[in-house]
Amino acid sequence: MLIEDDCCAITFGNMKYQLKIPQSHQVHIRSVLLSLLQANLLSVHTVSSALDITAAHCRELSAKLVNDGVTEVLIDKRKGQKQDFRVDLSVKAELIQHFAARAVTGHSTSSQVLTELINDTQKTTISSRTIRWHMNKLGLMKIKKTFPILVEALKKTPDPAC
């Protein structure tokens, strides 16, 4: 077996029979190498080195593969956090409200200042880092400079449809 930059090449017998799997196909490589390990055609050391995992983890994956199959063992099913636990809708509303008011009036919209205001009004202990993350997620940092200009333009416009 030979690991190259772009593929994993497994040679059977002489050079006559060779299986090449692109390195980008990690699930394919793992399933083939672990299957060859189960058939005692490759050693645990060889497979674990090729997959860049420990020998113990390699044995564990091999055993799980026999019992549970490829989709249960090798395919990553993580989907991330489904909801915000610390920052609910009321905290987000408070963040947007304080951000907008401070941006329009020319006050600081730093995460530190907004964190103090939100923690005081909502009686929470949210960190500045979390507030910064939500500011970016909500796109507030992109409107930080244009928001006051838009508000001033709307004040000067006599047409209420604008």
Image (cartoon, grey):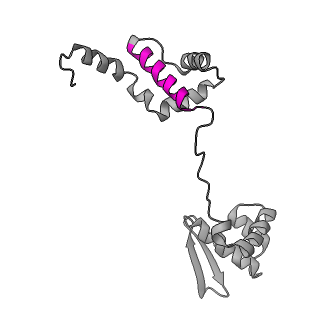
Left or right, residue 16 beside residue 48: left
Left or right of 25, for residue 2: right
The x and y percentages for residue 120 are 61, 15
Q: Is residue 153 left or right of residue 86?
A: left
Vertically, is 11 above or below 154? below
Q: Which residues are magenta?
A: 87-104
Please provide percent x and percent y for residue 27. 61, 67
Q: Main secondary structure of the magenta part?
A: helix
Tell me the residue at 60%/45% (across/down). Answer: 81
Q: Nearer the viewer, residue 135 or 28?
A: 135
Q: Would you say residue 128 sits in the magenta stretch?
A: no
Q: Residue at x 81, y 63 (%)?
A: 56
The residue drawn where x is 59% and y is 82% is 18
Q: Position of residue 87 (x, y in %)?
A: 58, 31
Location of residue 129 (image quadrant): top right
- 92 inside magenta stretch: yes
The answer to which image quadrant residue 11 occupies is bottom right
- Determine the image quadrant of residue 115: top right
Left/right of residue 160 with respect to residue 116 in the rendered view:
left
